[in-house]
Image (cartoon, helix red, strand yellow):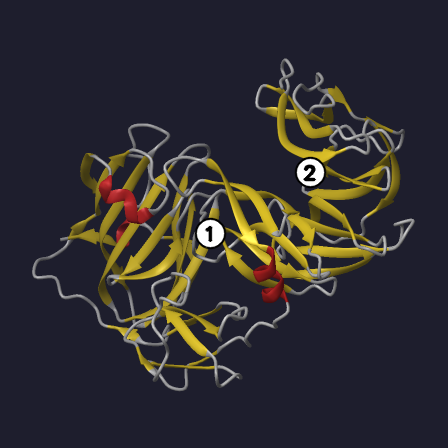
Amino acid sequence: LSERDVDLRDPQLSVTPGGRIMLNMGGSYYEGDKLVQMKPKVSFSDEKGVNFSVPQDVILEEGLKKGKDWLWKATWHDGTAWAGIYQPFGDSTSVVLAKSYDGIHYGYVTKFNIPGSANETTLRFDEKDNMIAIVRREGSNNRNGYIGMSAPPYQNWKWNELGARLGGPDLIILPNGKMLCGSRFYQLGMTDKTVIAKVTPEGKYIKLVTLPSGSDCSYPGMLIRDGVLWMSYYSSHEDKTAIYLVRLWLDRLEEMTEHEPVPDPVVRNPQPKIIELSCADEEAVIHFTLDGTEPGTQAPVYQKPINISHPVEVRARAFKGDGPPSRTVLAVVGTDIMQEAQKPKKKPKKGLRYRYFEGSVRMTSEIDKLPLRASGVAPEISITPRMRDTDFAFVFEGLIHIPQDGLYTFYLASNDGSRLFIDDFMLINNDNPHAVREKKGSVSLKAGYHKIKVKYFQLGGQRELRLFWQGLGFGKKAVSPDVLFHN
């Protein structure tokens, strides 16, 4: 399906009361690189579901149409198609509920009163004709999704914030009445995943299943047939982006939804260089990691206090039997442990050594697999020495001179992925493909020279790599060439 000079995207399927397949999609209109208009489109199959009609405009009643309208997904119920239409304007986005009797003409029902920039919305109906909406949010400091419920005529809604950020969410109600949400799961400092989670109208979000996935992923579709939950989704964790199909046994999923998750573990730092973990459920087993990875059942089991010598990012998760595990608890410990300075044998020279690579990777750990194209000394951490604008990577290594003993906070901003290492340990993990994003990490350093390394890769689109710091006697500023050296 195509339309001249229109970008058709985000296809969503449903089945009309007459048994035809209805395909909703968004139509984006551009002038150069500027998005000037968004029109929802629809196409219908023949009775056999083989051939589809030419895409046509969805007709929105006067007052509902705003010029940038995105009917993301329609749901049929008792002969009526219901949809959340989101309308972006500047930094804000709102969602209105609309209905149609033919899948073409839609009328206004109500506006969802959700804080932040609400957008992608999936609607479902329970056995009592209540409508449930699960909504993605962006644009604000708190990006957690929202879940809402309303009785007919669906104009008065009760909303609750979910305990997770959503991406391309789908929702399905199991025969036992429990609800599952398929969505992208955003993980701090790690690659994103596509997951299935139990959700409740009160806002509980309990992750049950993590599917093979990574980085740019999600937008699942789910249905139940013959005791199996079928789910399709896309992901880019293998060589290239692909669409995956999985099946999960319904009886096992329903059993999982009947259990409450294990209580979250508690991270304590009772004295310098010591980490203690505990859980309110004494029968639970706590798994932990110190390398930024997700603690699954293959991770080390906590048995006694952990000794550390530098700042670490501890992640802990509690497991018990076959029930849902706890959430992952993250804590940064050891920023008060003073790190000794290096003692170079010769007087260091100005600048950092760099290696420049070309090729496509999705994690900084893969950079060394790329062909090396150039190397040298750069006065500062910058992508200026690059030889092209896409699919390249840098590794900067050397020393940073610390003026006096104290606590220093570093800020690493990049598009795409980057990591900062101080004295051979990872202080900031800003890895994986993403838009411009800044992360920070703190460490106590003695005056003198300390090892510094920055790894960075760029795929396409906007490019950025910047390093800032803040310490005793000075506020946040760029790390300048006068403190960077190499042996």
Query: At which x and y percent is residue 436?
Result: 48, 44
The answer to whether residue 477 is left or right of residue 130 is left
For marks 2 and 1, give the CA distance.
22 Å
The label number, if any, that marks residue 438 in the structure image: 1
Check whether the beta carbons of the residues at disc 2 and disc 1 lie within 8 A of each other: no
Q: Amino acid at mark 1?
A: Glu
The label number, if any, that marks residue 90 in the structure image: 2
> Which image quadrant for residue 203?
bottom right
Query: At which x and y percent is residue 327?
Result: 53, 68
The answer to whether residue 40 is left or right of residue 215 is right
Query: At which x and y percent is residue 231?
Result: 57, 45
Front residue of 115/148: it is 148
Q: Is residue 138 above or below residue 325?
A: above
Res 380 visible:
no
Closer to the N terminus: mark 2 or mark 1?
2
The answer to whether residue 443 is left or right of residue 69 is left
Which residue is the extreme one toward the top?
4
Look at the numbered disc 1 and give the secondary structure of its residue. strand
Q: Is residue 443 above or below residue 53?
A: below
